[in-house]
Amino acid sequence: MRDERFSGVSCSMTRAMATLGSKWKPIIIHNINNRKIRFGQLNALIPLITRKVLTEQLKELEEDGILLRESFSELPPRVEYSLTAKGLALLPILNSVCEWNAQFEHTKTCSVGNTHQSTP
């Protein structure tokens, strides 16, 4: 029998993980951070992702209200991506994940603007 006290928490966690479910989405969000960035720049920052997968992940993040895609009517066409308020709210969470990893893996933290060597 399911414990109903935890059903709301489980449901909330399930929805959150569905939004951030791929390995690439948190990396994309972390790399965009507080700036506007073009597709090519983002692709260069994440060298292991294919252009096809990056395009799909950006589209899903936009559909989930985490990312804003702004296109400009220029030649050549220009598109910039930035985080919405919902996306910006994820940054402290992702920085906490980086700090957690650094604590247990003895690596550098990956929080933007505050990179330091962790202590054993």
Image: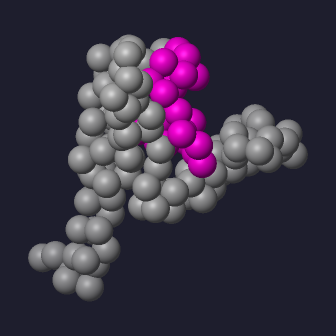
Asked if 89 appears above or below 36 in the picture, the reply is: below
Q: Quadrant of the C terminus?
A: top right
Q: Residue furthest front?
A: 74
Q: How is the image coloured?
A: one colour
Nearest the camera: 48 or 119?
A: 48
Residue 28, image x, y percentages: 47, 35
Q: Quadrant of residue 71?
A: top left
Residue 17, image x, y percentages: 33, 52
Q: Residue furthest left?
A: 1
Which stretch is magenta? Answer: 25-47
Majority SS type along the magenta span: helix
The answer to whether residue 111 is seen in the rendering is yes
Asked if 70 appears above or below 52 in the picture, the reply is: below
Which residue is pictured at 19% across the width and 83% down the height? 4
Nearest the camera: 84 or 19?
A: 84
Residue 80, image x, y percentages: 44, 34
Which residue is pictured at 42% across the width and 61% down the height? 86
Which residue is pictured at 32% across the width and 44% down the height? 61
Q: Is residue 39 magenta?
A: yes
Nearest the camera: 21 or 102?
A: 21
The answer to whether residue 54 is seen in the rendering is no
How many numbered discs sit on the rendered protein? 0
Q: Quadrant of the N terminus?
A: bottom left
On screen, residue 11 versus residue 21, left or right, reads left
Residue 25, image x, y percentages: 41, 38
On screen, residue 72 versus residue 83, left or right, reads left
Q: Residue furthest bottom?
A: 5
